[in-house]
Image (cartoon, grey):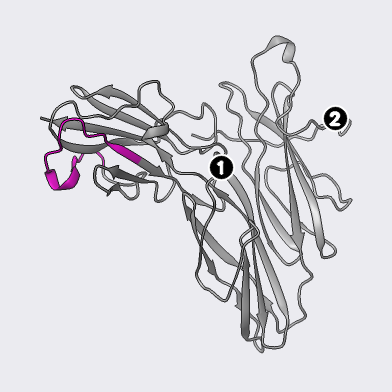
Amino acid sequence: MHIGLRAFSLPLVLVLASCGGGGSGGGSSNSAPTASFAVACTDLACNFTNLSTDQDVGDQIIAYMWTFGDGSATETTLNTSHTFAAASTYTVTLVAIDTKGLRGTATRPVTVTTPAVPASPHANFTASCLALDCTFTDTSTYDPGSVFQSRTWDFGDATTLPAANPATHTYASQPQVTTYIVKLTVTDATGKTSTSTQSIPVAPPVTSLGCVSNNCSLNLTQAARVTVTLVSHACSARHNTVVLTAPVNQTVFSDGCYDTTGVPVSIGGGQLFAAGTALQFTVLSGTLSTSTISFSPNLRISGDFAQGWTLKFDDGYGGPAEPDFNDLVILVKATP
């Protein structure tokens, strides 16, 4: 689903556009690329992963410009790393430019800290999310002579938590994908500290009640038994989860991108549901800190009671021709 990207140097006299901006293109319907990036820092050293996408068919991103807010030279590579000279908060900017010359801009504050002297802690952590619920695991290391004393999590939404490992946190529901800057600070027994930061994308859950199709009704017009089949999957995210929330609560697929296709799953143990029963589904997107998720997940529903309903889910991962609504294709069949 991804095409190869190349980085080119462009004259720096080009004027940076505001986020998502672009030129008129002489009447062209081409839209500006969506610039996005993930960042992971330990003390003064940061790695930046480019997550930019261009959704226009036949178009692609051909150039990038990174600026780090510290007066250093502009970088034009796809991904980059940068070591800041002093502890502070810097404004890092990525500009993505497509073949039409249109550009998108992503800007993010990045806070770095001064590394401790030898015999010190080295903060690090991993992150995974299922919709709004995230788990963070401290994987910090300690030099010989440095012993763990305490840790503090900052989840990037004005919420902090001491001590816990792993730490779990549920973010407030937002209408779109939201990226949070999560920070872990560890302190050793001598008072030396180290900080690690990562950008974490969090995707809201998608329900059949809010699908993007015109007709999203999943009502049983007759008493019937219901099966759900994963027809196909074309995605790579871990733990995309499909849950029936009404009339019973049942996790139908717990890892949709990898679960077996073509096998009907009986709902409610094969029980008979009354006429007029409404089926309601929720799909939870599994995301990691390096995910290329760039727009909110969505669901489309087609079909009827007689034919069965087809649910097509797009998890919001970026790339050409996205969203393509083929990440999960699910058949819901009612048998009177």
Considering every residue shown, the one lying at the far top of the view is 27
Where residue 335 sits: x, y (%)?
12, 31
Judge by depth and name the residue closer to the eye, 96 or 166.
166
Would you name the residue on which mark 2 appears?
15
- Quarter of the image with the C terminus in it: top left
Q: Which residues are magenta?
A: 261-281
Query: Disc 1 or 2, which lies upstream in sequence?
Result: 2
Q: Residues within 10 Å of mark 2 (few under 14, many from 20)?
A: few
Front-most of residues 20 and 81: 20
Q: Which residue is mark 1?
A: 177
Left or right, residue 334 beside residue 128: left
Amino acid carrying label 1: it is: Val
Determine which quarter of the picture holds residue 139. Answer: bottom right
Q: State how many labels appear.
A: 2
Instruction: Point out which mark residue 126 bears.
Output: none
Magenta run includes residue 151: no
Q: What residue lies at 74% left-to-right and 62% top-to-bottom?
A: 45
Q: Are marks 1 and 2 in contact (CB under 8 Å)?
A: no
